[in-house]
Amino acid sequence: MTTARPDIYKVPVDRQLAGLPYKVAHDTITDEHPVALHHHELYEIFLVTEGPVRHLINDAEYELATRSVVLIRPDDLHTFRCARGRPSAQIVNVPFVTSLFRRAGELLSADQIAAVRQMKHGHAECLMTEWKALLAKVRWLEAEYRQHDSANTRILIGLVLDVVSILTAQTSDGDELPYWLRNAMNAMQLEENYLEGVPRLVELSGHSAEHVSRTMRRHLNRTPSAFVNQVRLQAAAHLLKTTEREVTDIIFEVGYESASHFNREFRKYYGVTARNYRNRAWNIGG
């Protein structure tokens, strides 16, 4: 058990949140004031705003660049160290109660929930568009964090969903993805790319379609078409949560030519129809 080790500190939720559902903290990482190895009674999201920084988590070590995002689960053991040759690093930390993660989980697919449970490190480097969206939500939460209202709950749940989508789009259970494939998959999150489908993924990779397919199967156990389908479904889910556009308009906007195909795939991925998903998302902050 983790508590049997004297070098591990468990951070009490009351000390970290002082009775609030979440908080936002800006932290400077220096080796002069090292952070003890610890775990939590809650979840955390942190953004590396000025890196690199070394993240030690679950007996492994990773160097995280600026624009990296990390999801920490309650049982994760972790701490930070400065990158070698660097005097400091800056992170923004958002701890939040487990009940909020459970509510966010109502809008995640079974595959995403399983991926979060199985993650070894829970980090990814964001595209600039993703990064700006995450920072906007964090700034809202920081400005309004003492307001206990449904808007804050929706923003925080939206932040969790965005982070999980970024992580599950990039994470593999096996070896680290080749750099060329990770970059191509990151770029496919952009609308102008996912609308063009698998041919655009292949073009962005700089490799043949056969090589892309073999590599994705080996590292991710899925096909390029399944990956593109996932990206489009997540884009549709985002529009369902954040706009009042008609479902039929969203279907074609994210690249599906058949409403019946979309409905079948969406229900398989999220476990509910698109309309029920929207109703659940709009009611979840209440």
Image (spheres, rainbow, N blue to C red):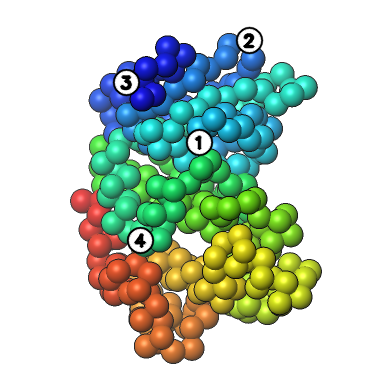
Q: Residues within 10 Å of mark 1 (few under 14, many from 20)?
A: many
Residue 143 is at least partly visible in this image: no
What distance separates the C-alpha of mark 2 from that of mark 4?
Answer: 43 Å
Say how many tags the image has. Answer: 4
Circle 3: residue type: Pro
Front disc: 1 or 3? 3
Mark sitting earlier along the chain (1/3): 3
Residue 27 is situated, as x and y percent measured from the top left of the image, at 54, 23
Mark sitting earlier along the chain (2/3): 3
Of 101 and 19, the residue lying toward us: 101
What distance separates the C-alpha of mark 2 from that of mark 1?
Answer: 21 Å
Q: 44 left or right of 79?
A: left
Residue at the spot of label 3: 12
Of 99 and 250, the residue lying toward us: 99
Circle 2: residue type: Glu
Residue at the spot of label 2: 32
Check contact, mark 2 vs mark 3: CB within 8 A.
no
Q: Residues within 10 Å of mark 3 (few under 14, many from 20)?
A: few
* In the image, residue 34 above or below residue 282: above
* In the image, residue 191 above or below residue 281: below
Residue 157 is at least partly visible in this image: yes
What distance separates the C-alpha of mark 2 from that of mark 3?
Answer: 24 Å
Mark sitting earlier along the chain (2/1): 2
Residue at the spot of label 4: 110
Label at residue 115:
none
Mark sitting earlier along the chain (4/3): 3
What distance separates the C-alpha of mark 4 from that of mark 3?
Answer: 30 Å
Residue at the spot of label 1: 46
